[in-house]
Image (cartoon, helix red, strand yellow):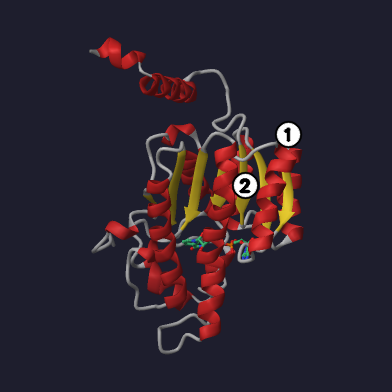
Amino acid sequence: MFKVLFNSKKIQSVGHQTFLNFRAYSTTKKGRLDGKVALITGGADGVGKESSLLFAKEGAKVLVVDLNEIKGKEVVSQIKANGGEASFFRADVSKAADVKEMVEAAEKTFGKLNILFNNAGIMISEDDDSVNTTEEVWDKTMNVNLKGVFLGCKFGIPALKRAGGGTIINTASFVALMGAATPQIAYTASKGGVLALTRELAIIHARQNIRVNALCPGPLRTELLDKFLNTDEKRNRRLVHLPMGRFGYANEIANGALFLASDESSYVTANTFLVDGGLTSSYVTPI
Ligand SMILES: NC(=O)c1ccc[n+]([C@@H]2O[C@H](COP(=O)([O-])OP(=O)(O)OC[C@H]3O[C@@H](n4cnc5c(N)ncnc54)[C@H](O)[C@@H]3O)[C@@H](O)[C@H]2O)c1
């Protein structure tokens, strides 16, 4: 029985995958993303910047995509100074024409696309509850955080197929899973949408060698939250709920993204991957 199964094409391909995974534990010093091409949106700062640096260090060729050309090009220079390969492409992820061109740029520059990290996101300080949030804040947040991820998948999935498969990581947030009395209703709704969209795409493409996962960071010390939590009072209102008693760092999220990007997560898809310091499992925190 085993022999018959082992001879089938399906099992051989699983065997090949196992071999790929085995490489990750071998003692030869190979990068965890050797030979892969990654596109990272929001790559100029925070989680995207740390992921760009880490993915390149692990052997990926990285297309850093952002609105911020100066900071994006600095990330590329840093990667090149460390011996890695990277290029910058300026795109607004909420604009279909830009997103189409960014995917084309990855294929044109590096020959293919294996890893798509839809990470760019915004949180607008006027975002509030449903009564006080303006339509403008709602639309802008949705356009970047949710439509941006949709467009990334719309134009990225055909490119992954051309490469024989690949992996997509969509950045959501712990706020998609918990309610808060310190509301940002548009942001929260946009991240809930990212979770639902990710789950469905993962199932649609599960037999096409394409994995799709949502990465849910806890609250982080990056520009996005620092701008918003600009007083001790605001910070402490949240810190008391964090089991570890601290905010996370962008590089801690990049490590989670690396796992989802690599072949080590070959049986992980449609996942809500939490890197939140235990926040979403917590009731009473330690003193
Ligand atoms: N910081 C947190 O506490 C936190 C928590 C949970 C989830 N997240 C999510 O993690 C992701 C990264 O957040 P971060 O904290 O690194 O933010 P950040 O503000 O440090 O970096 C975001 C980057 O995205 C870029 N960007 C913004 N709008 C863009 C657009 N329309 N097109 C292209 N690039 C654009 C910015 O220029 C910036 O470089 C976001 O999706 C965010 O919602 C953050």
Which numbered mark, 1 or 2, is in the foreground of this view? 2
Query: Measured along the vertical axis of the image, is residue 50 above or below residue 96?
Result: above
Q: Residue at x 29, y 10 (%)?
A: 3
Q: Residue at x 45, y 89 (%)?
A: 132
Above or below residue 271? Residue 188 is below
Give the image quarter of residue 190. Answer: bottom left
Secondary structure beneath dot 2 equals strand
In x, y percent, where is residue 195? 40, 59
Residue drawn at x 62%, y 47% is 39
Quarter of the displayed picture in which ligand 1 can be seen: bottom right
Q: Is mark 2 within 8 Å of ligand 1?
A: no
Kindly indicate the quadrant of the structure image that contains residue 108. Answer: top right
Q: Which mark is residue 39?
A: 2
- Which residue is identified by label 1? 83
Amino acid type for the residue under numbered disc 1:
Gly
Q: Is residue 125 visible?
A: no
Looking at the rendered structure, the secondary structure element under dot 1 is loop
- Give residue 147's position: percent from left, percent from top: 53, 65
Furthest-top residue in this view: 3
Instruction: Report, in whole angstroms, how far the alpha carbon at label 1 lies from the one at label 2.
Output: 18 Å
The one nearer the camera, 218 or 150, is 150
Q: What's the amino acid at mark 2?
A: Leu
Residue density around tag 1, few if under 14, some if 14–19, many if 20 or more, within 10 Å? few
Q: Nearer the viewer, residue 224 or 216?
A: 216
Quadrant of residue 107 in the image?
top right
Horizontally, residue 116 falls left or right of residue 107, namely left
Cβ atoms under marks 1 and 2 closer than 8 Å? no
**Relative to residue 186, is residue 78 drawn left or right?**
right
| Label 1, ligand 1: CB separation under 8 Å | no
